């Protein structure tokens, strides 16, 4: 009897632990969408930059951990600190918040270009996240001096 009571207690404890650590069983984890994607026409043949906003309407944070682009051999995640670009391993997409990739700040650095993007072209990005499924984005190529207009309610696009 003592042995079966201990076994039952261990089973209940394990079941309780599993319920506490289950991930996104109610669908309220990160909910991501991408807006305002574009690539500035690069002045050089081998490098370009991509910009976009990842909006998270979910209750949990996520991390942008990698990206690919159809025209680049490599895409790096970059941040700008003290006017210097620095490669980073990931970028946080906060719950009920946004990750803005924009000029002068965080951005995607397209390297080893297969061809130089021209105005009117479209670049296809695939964004990979720590939790969420990958998102594929079509980003038009804009002129070098392009400045996106602010979105309604002070949001950036």
Image: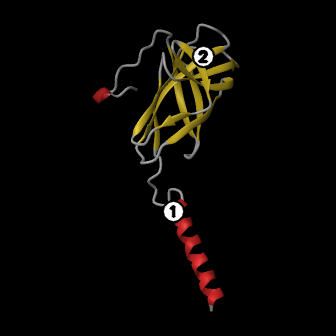
Q: Residues within 10 Å of mark 1 (few under 14, many from 20)?
A: few
Q: Is residue 5 above or below residue 143?
A: below
Per the image, the residue denoted by label 2 is 48
Q: Is residue 5 above or below residue 31?
A: below
Please tell me whether mark 1 or mark 2 is closer to you in this view. 1
Which residue occupies the foreground of this view, 65 or 33? 65
Q: Residue 42 sits in which quadrant?
A: top right
In the rendered image, the residue lying farthest to the front is 2
Q: Are marks 1 and 2 in contact (CB under 8 Å)?
A: no
Q: Residue at x 63, y 81 (%)?
A: 7
Which residue occupies the foreground of this view, 60 or 39? 60
Q: Residue 57 sits in which quadrant?
A: top left
Q: Secondary structure at mark 2?
A: strand
Residue 9 rendering spot, x and y as whole percentages: 57, 79
Residue 1 located left or right of residue 26? right
Residue 77 rendering spot, x and y as whole percentages: 59, 26
Q: Is residue 23 above or below residue 45?
A: below
Quadrant including the N terminus:
bottom right
Residue 94: mark in rendering: none
Q: Residue at x 40, y 37 (%)?
A: 97
Quadrant including the C terminus:
top left
Q: Residue at x 40, y 19 (%)?
A: 148
Residue 41 rendering spot, x and y as whole percentages: 55, 13
User: How far apart are the two marked residues, 1 and 2, measured between alpha carbons?
Assistant: 44 Å
Which sits earlier in the primary sequence, circle 1 or circle 2? 1
Q: Secondary structure at mark 1?
A: helix
Please state the total of marks drawn on the protein image: 2
Per the image, the residue denoted by label 1 is 20
In the rendered image, the residue lying farthest to the bottom is 1
């Amino acid at each position: 009897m003592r042995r079966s009571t201990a076994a039952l207690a261990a089973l209940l404890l394990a079941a309780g632990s599993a319920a506490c650590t289950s991930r996104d069983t109610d669908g309220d984890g990160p909910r991501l969408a991408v807006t305002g994607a574009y690539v500035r026409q690069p002045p050089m043949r081998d490098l370009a930059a991509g910009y976009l906003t990842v909006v998270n309407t979910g209750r949990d944070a996520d991390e942008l951990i990698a990206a690919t682009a159809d025209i680049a051999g490599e895409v790096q995640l970059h941040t700008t600190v003290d006017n210097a670009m620095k490669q980073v391993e990931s970028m946080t997409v906060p719950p009920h918040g946004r990750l803005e990739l924009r000029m002068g700040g965080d951005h995607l650095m397209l390297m080893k270009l297969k061809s130089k993007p021209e105005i009117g072209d479209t670049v296809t990005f695939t964004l990979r996240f720590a939790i969420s499924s990958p998102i594929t984005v079509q980003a038009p190529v804009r002129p070098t001096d392009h400045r996106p207009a602010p979105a309604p309610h002070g949001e950036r696009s």
